[in-house]
Image (cartoon, rainbow, N blue to C red):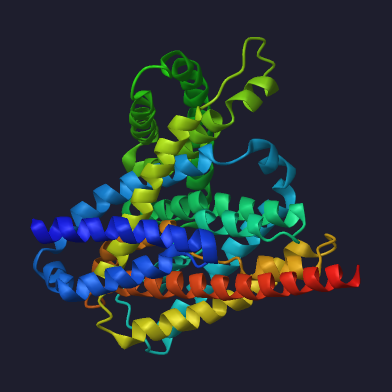
């Protein structure tokens, strides 16, 4: 117990220091948290615990993963400006679709190829394994992308909006696609494109409608109780109920968890943009939205969840098989290539400067969604399709998250350096 509390304390301190370093140097805290988790896992021999009590760890991981999904999507919703979302929607949506689809397909084809030539041995459908891994690592991380984009002074406003929108939309997209694949495998018994698309449409439509409706209702109730002590805790409780209710309406076996995730995003979007939404629907009374104290509380909750999960992923990584690291590095190189293609398509005839294109190119960090999905679904898919390949999803996700964070850090640092050089040259010329 004493050691556990000590480790918990160190994790929180490291999370704070990592956030401080990020604010001052643009180096994401993900890097330090993952490496610390790796050290903790080695010291406390977490790998042995995984082998002795696999079901216990899967239960714990599943419970905390569900909480994390609710928190990160709700937090993403309340921190999204709905006007900005609409304004940058066309190019932002294009980058989201291109970036995710190209990452998804390239990872899928690579895993299928590796299985066919004997690099890995999948006792089942390699297409499923590739699809799950592709969906897990298919999106960028908004807690890293948005602050970095708005610190680069010479970027065009539309570039900041495009990168922000992509990072906001890909988290729920990754989560919902993984849930859809899981639904097809467990209920239908195979990957069926028609069933998958139908499930995604149902998931998004039900999640959006229920999330918006419940958010609109709670907006008025929240305004009535906002002055009561600890009212922000009440909102958090309602978020969990929104997730549970939406999941129940759709059905757990019908992909309801994906709909629940989308409803949390929409619920947060309504509460965080209450004044704007009330104006859109021509509400004649006094406008209101979530107060700063409540936003601060939920930002704190999201910070704790992020800190915990990155350390937890590091702890769960085993690196028993060097092939997993090599596969992760190959996928990382592939992601760089497809990122270039996605950015080229998105910026075509869009009036983007060279610096803007380069920034969009390096803004590819994977984050919390990848960590959560690898921890939540990885063990189950490994047991079903790849027995003996313990840690396949978690180890590769670790390499991708760490690698993309480093690429983003170096890329942004180089761009910032040249920005400063240009500014200094311009000042001297004056």
Residue 224 placement, left or right of 83: left
| Residue 423 x/y as whole percent | 79, 68
* Looking at the image, residue 69 lies above or below residue 346: above
Residue 257 placement, left or right of 158: left
| Residue 133 x/y as whole percent | 42, 67
Out of 91 and 30, give the one closest to the viewer. Answer: 30
| Residue 110 x/y as whole percent | 49, 79
Viewer can see residue 191: no
Residue 20 placement, left or right of 379: right
Out of 342 and 295, give the one closest to the viewer. Answer: 295
Q: Quadrant of residue 326?
A: bottom left
User: In the rendered view of the protein, which quadrant contains the C terminus?
Assistant: bottom right
Q: Which residue is painted at 32% across and 82% down in the image?
A: 121
Furthest residue toward right: 430
Out of 296 and 167, give the one closest to the viewer. Answer: 296
* Looking at the image, residue 251 lies above or below residue 64: above
Q: Which residue is painted at 50% across and 47% down in the image?
A: 200
Q: Quadrant of residue 274?
A: top right
Out of 297 and 369, give the one closest to the viewer. Answer: 297
Furthest residue toward top: 285
Residue 171 placement, left or right of 420: left
User: In the rendered view of the protein, which quadrant contains the N terminus?
Assistant: bottom left
Viewer can see residue 82: yes
Q: Which residue is painted at 51% across and 27% down in the image?
A: 290
């Amino acid at each position: 117990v004493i050691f556990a509390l000590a480790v918990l304390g160190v994790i929180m301190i490291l999370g704070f220091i990592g956030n401080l370093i990020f604010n001052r140097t643009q180096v994401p805290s993900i890097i330090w948290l993952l490496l610390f988790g790796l050290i903790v896992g080695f010291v406390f021999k977490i790998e042995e615990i995984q082998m002795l009590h696999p079901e216990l760890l899967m239960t714990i991981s599943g419970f905390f993963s569900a909480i994390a999904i609710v928190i990160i999507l709700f937090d993403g919703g309340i921190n999204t400006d709905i006007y900005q979302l609409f304004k940058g929607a066309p190019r932002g949506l294009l980058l989201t679709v291109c970036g995710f689809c190209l990452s998804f397909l390239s990872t899928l084809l690579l895993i299928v190829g590796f299985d066919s030539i004997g690099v890995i041995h999948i006792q089942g459908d390699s297409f499923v394994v590739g699809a799950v891994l592709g969906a897990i690592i298919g999106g960028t991380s908004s807690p890293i992308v948005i602050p970095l984009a708005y610190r680069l002074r010479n970027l065009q406003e539309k570039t900041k909006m495009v990168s922000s929108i992509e990072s906001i939309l890909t988290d729920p997209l990754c989560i919902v696609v993984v849930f859809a694949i899981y639904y097809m495998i467990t209920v239908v018994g195979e990957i069926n494109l028609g069933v998958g698309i139908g499930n995604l449409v149902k998931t998004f439509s039900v999640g959006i409608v229920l999330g918006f409706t419940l958010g609109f209702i709670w907006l008025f109730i929240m305004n009535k109780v906002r002055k009561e002590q600890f009212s922000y805790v009440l909102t958090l409780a309602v978020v969990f109920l929104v997730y549970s209710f939406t999941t129940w309406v759709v059905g757990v076996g019908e992909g309801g968890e994906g709909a629940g995730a989308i409803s949390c995003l929409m619920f947060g979007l309504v509460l965080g943009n209450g004044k704007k939404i009330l104006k859109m629907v021509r509400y004649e009374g006094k406008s209101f939205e979530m107060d700063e104290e409540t936003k601060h509380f939920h930002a704190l909750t999201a910070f704790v969840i992020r800190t915990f999960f990155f350390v937890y992923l590091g702890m769960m990584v085993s690196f028993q098989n060097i092939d997993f690291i090599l596969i992760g590095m190959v996928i990382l190189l592939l992601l760089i290539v497809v990122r270039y293609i996605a950015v080229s398509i998105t910026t075509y005839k869009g009036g983007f400067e060279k610096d803007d294109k380069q920034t969009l190119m390096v803004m590819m960090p994977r984050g919390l969604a990848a960590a959560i999905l690898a921890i939540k679904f990885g063990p189950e898919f490994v047991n079903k399709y790849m027995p003996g390949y313990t840690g396949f999803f978690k180890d590769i996700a670790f390499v991708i998250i760490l690698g993309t964070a480093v690429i983003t850090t170096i890329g942004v640092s180089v761009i910032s350096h040249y920005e400063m050089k240009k500014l200094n040259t311009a000042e001297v010329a004056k």
